[in-house]
Amino acid sequence: MASVRTRLTAAYTAALAGTLVIFTFALLVARTEGNFAELQRSVADQASAAARAIKQSELSNQPVTVPGDKPGSRTVNPMLRIALEGVPSYLLVLDDTGKTLYASFAVRQLTDDDIATLVRTSLRLSATRPSVKVTLGEDQLLLVAREEPGDVQRGARPMRVVAGASTRRVGVIPPEQWTIMLGVAPLLIGVSVWFAWLIAGNALRPVDRVIDEVEAITDGRSLHRRLNVEDRGDELDRLAATLNEMIARLETSFSALRRFTADASHELKTPLTVMRADVERAMQVPSGSGDQLVALEEALAESARMADLVDSLLTLARADEGRFEVHREPVYLEPLVRDVAETAHILGESQGIDIALPVMEDALVMGDRARLRQLLLNLITNAIKYTAAGGSVEIALSRRIDGVSVSVRDTGIGISAADLPFVFERFWRADRARSRASERGGFGLGLAIAKWIAQAHGGTLSVTSRLGRGSTFTVLLPLAADVSRPDGEPALSDDGAARPAGERSIGIS
């Protein structure tokens, strides 16, 4: 396949050759028109010269016409004939009746039919049509007429002088011009092609440099390198800047992939190691003994933990590929939040953590009830996990102008400002002190899944936190078209029973 440089040179050569052809054609047309105009002036001058000769004969008191050889015919006088013979090419002098008084030597060489055609055409010339073309045999003549009224006082009859010339040479290009055109055009094209090749090579040299730099980066281990942008403001600089942005995104993706692989391997390695140890211990103790049952129970717990990890990874992988469907249906959030609060009460009871619902404003959203419940459970479980005994977790449901807000606030250890940008990354957990604060060590995938669920519902998930003072996670979801239940209809309690409309919040401890 030809290179871009070759294609550009070929395109330039074709454009130049086409331009030369068009220019040559235009030049030929202009030359033909100029030659024809020049021929028309020359023929008109000949007709005028003949008319002046006739006028001069009248002024010299000489008869313009004399009797001809045939009875009743007339012809110009001998002196005038001599003067008219000096006019080259075709010349006719006709009287007012259309009879020929004089015909030049060129006219006399024509056939009788051609002479008749020439005379008929000459009679059609008028003041509004002083020139005309006529074809005689294989030649074409340009005819121009001049009227000579004659001396009225002397009884001279008016005459028509018609001069003509062949148009055969009008469009003929002299051989020397063909020689110049055919000799200069190839030389001009050759020099232009050479310059085009040099210019294209110089213009594409930065592209070659970009290709070399990109080839040096494609090994995956040099993504920290960037292309040189010379800040010229042209297309190549924009290309280099775009490639740098793409390389930066690839570097981020590769780093995240390596970190994700390492974290996933680590998280899977631990339960597999524990399971192997438990199975080996169960094989070494007597069958049915208490130690064997304890070992098998621990292995079962680790297998369940590993299954949860694999399920979370599968959920995120399907979400990344867009293959995880969200089944939308009308969902009232207040019963859902209360149901999750009951689960939170069970989880926090053993650690002495209070669960409170200070604000509960029911709202209707279009969403997947199971996924929304998973979102809230992830947030609440995360809050309980990092809240010390005696602390509290508040779940608030409130309607806003831009949607409905569900916030989970805890009084736990909080998150440092440096860690906040990484909260929703996969396998991320806060500093080691935060990780050790809970006996229920997680995988670091719960918040990533929660954020995906919020985004899948057209909402957002944000966090505010201060180290040592707790964290607040806020989910903002768009309201459905029917944003509230009809007035007067009681809201539903956790068990589906009607709750008094004035009851706005509850506390669970």
Image (spheres, rainbow, N blue to C red):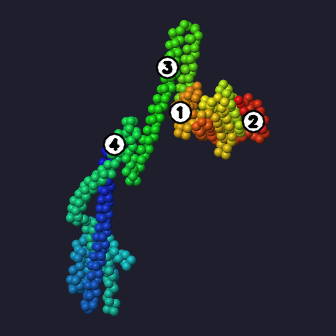
- Specify few, some or many for label 2: CA neighbours under 10 Å numbering under 14, 14-19, or 20 or more: many
Residue drawn at 37 percent across, 78 percent down: 126
Query: How far from the left and from the top, in percent, is residue 432?
Result: 53, 31
Which three-letter amino acid code belongs to the residue tagged 4?
Asp
In the rendered structure, which disc, 1 or 4, sits on the residue that comes first in sequence? 4
User: Which residue in the structure is indicated by mark 2?
Assistant: 491
Q: Secondary structure at mark 2?
A: strand
Image quadrant where one finds the C terminus: top right
Q: CA distance from mark 2 to mark 1?
A: 42 Å
Q: Is residue 125 above or below residue 231?
A: below
User: Which residue in the structure is indicated by mark 1?
Assistant: 431
Q: CA distance from mark 2 to mark 4?
A: 68 Å
In the rendered structure, which disc, 3 or 1, sits on the residue that comes first in sequence? 3
Q: CA distance from mark 3 to mark 2?
A: 50 Å
- Specify few, some or many for label 1: CA neighbours under 10 Å numbering under 14, 14-19, or 20 or more: few
Residue drawn at 47 percent across, 35 percent down: 256
Mark 1 vs mark 4, foreground winner is 1
Q: Is residue 132 above or below residue 276?
A: below
Residue 324 visible to the viewer: no
Residue drawn at 45 percent across, 40 percent down: 249
- Specify few, some or many for label 3: CA neighbours under 10 Å numbering under 14, 14-19, or 20 or more: few
User: Which residue in the structure is indicated by mark 4?
Assistant: 212
Which three-letter amino acid code belongs to the residue tagged 1?
Asp
Q: CA distance from mark 3 to mark 1?
A: 24 Å
Which three-letter amino acid code belongs to the residue tagged 3?
Thr
Q: Secondary structure at mark 3?
A: helix
Mark 3 vs mark 1, foreground winner is 1
What mark, if any, has residue 78 been given in the picture?
A: none
Q: CA distance from mark 4 to mark 3?
A: 47 Å
User: Which residue in the structure is indicated by mark 3?
Assistant: 273
